[in-house]
Amino acid sequence: MAFSAYILGVCQIGKEKEVLERCLSIKDVVEGTVVFGEYDVIVKVVTDDVKELSRRVEEIRRVEGLLRTATLISMQ
């Protein structure tokens, strides 16, 4: 079974692209983009192991310049 997480993030002003680049360099992050509205970035993580998924989410949440996140997990 594959597990996916969509992580929506709020960034420090002016740090959106930098935060996105850092997130995209993390293992298992398959895509991401800067968005406008309540959130500033969205990244997608895909893995076959729920424990690895949790580790990636924690790693993303520690990215410098990222202030707050919301995580949506799906199972395929």
Image (cartoon, grey):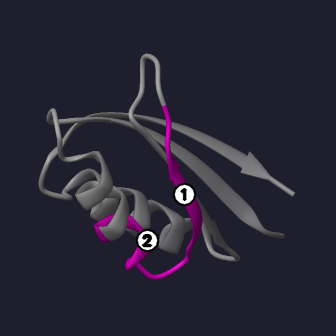
**Does 46 lie within the magenta span?**
no
Q: Position of residue 65 (x, y in %)?
A: 14, 48
Q: Secondary structure at mark 1?
A: strand
**Residue span colored magenta:** 22-35
Residue 19's place in the image compared with 16, above or below, is: below
Task: State the residue position of label 2.
Answer: 24
Tell me the tag on residue 32.
Answer: 1
Left or right relative to 49: residue 41? left
Q: Position of residue 24 (x, y in %)?
A: 43, 71
Q: Quadrant of residue 22?
A: bottom left
**Does 33 lie within the magenta span?**
yes
Residue 50's place in the image compared with 16, above or below, is: below
Going by the numbered disc 1, the residue's amino acid type is Gly
Answer yes or no: do the residues labelled 2 and 1 have beta carbons within 8 Å? yes
Q: Position of residue 50 (x, y in %)?
A: 59, 65
Q: Position of residue 43 (x, y in %)?
A: 52, 54
- Which residue is located at x 54 percent, y 77 percent? 28
Tell me the tag on residue 17.
Answer: none
